[in-house]
Image (spheres, rainbow, N blue to C red):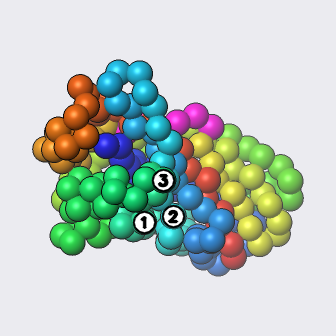
Amino acid sequence: MRTLLASCLIILAPTLALAQDWTLSSDTSSIGFVSIKNGDTAESHMFSGLSGGVSDAGAVEVSIPLANVETFIDIRNERMRDILFKVADFPAATVSAEIPLDDFADLEVGARQSTDIEITVAANDSDAVYDAAVYVTRISDASVAVSTARPVIADIRDFNYDDGIEQLREIAGLDSISPAVPVTFDLVFEQ
């Protein structure tokens, strides 16, 4: 009943050595999202198994395997995969952005900097652009964490998930599922 991200939302990675690409650490990166049902019941979910990276030119791409949705209820995971995301036809969502790597070139180990970026989320043959406030933290000489400073509010209608959400609402016997989905991410990029 929730979504995305994709909203999924997510993105960037800075660098010291600007001539080398950065790779997303799948084991230490995740995207979280919150679904709101019946007007006031919020539930936290996540995606794992992300992949992607940042090129030396600052082009960011993160792939979200939608089959890896984790709602902490098996039947709900299955329903979201099959009814909402239709993973047989649309196995992944992608997030892309362009970032100015020079802005982070002097970031010391342990230092954190905030910035605003524009991200494009593509899912279900649709795409949407969102503004994201993020923190960039230099973890080591060869790793950087990028995390949301505040949630990105994705809208399931941007990805034509209306019918899937309605089916999930009916199956679960709910009065409503909000189309607004707060999304957070914590991404670690390694050189």
Q: Could you tell me which secondary element the residue under label 2 belongs to? A: loop
Query: Looking at the image, is mark 3 or mark 2 earlier in the sequence?
Result: 2
For the point 59% across and 43% down, the residue is: 148
Q: Toward the viewer: 4 or 190?
A: 4
**Which tag is nearer the camera, tag 1 or tag 3?**
3
**How many neighbours does mark 1 have within 10 angstroms: few (below 14), some (14-19), or many (20 or more)?**
some
For badge 2, the amino acid type reads Ser
Q: What is the spatial separation of the Cα atoms under label 3 and label 2, in whole angstroms?
A: 13 Å
Q: CA distance from mark 1 to mark 3?
A: 11 Å
Query: Of helix, strand and loop, which one carries label 1?
Result: helix
Q: In the rendered structure, find residue 48 and report the number of the disc placed on it.
A: 2
Residue 174 position within the rendered picture, expressed as x and y whole percent measured from the top left? 25, 31
Label 3: few (<14), some or many (≥20) within 10 Å?
few
Measured Cα–Cα span from mark 1 to mark 2? 6 Å
**Of residues 84 and 15, the one drawn nearer to the viewer in this rendering:** 84
- Dot 1 and dot 3 residues touching (CB under 8 Å): no
Q: Amino acid at mark 1?
A: Asn
Lateral position of residue 104 relative to residue 54, left or right: right
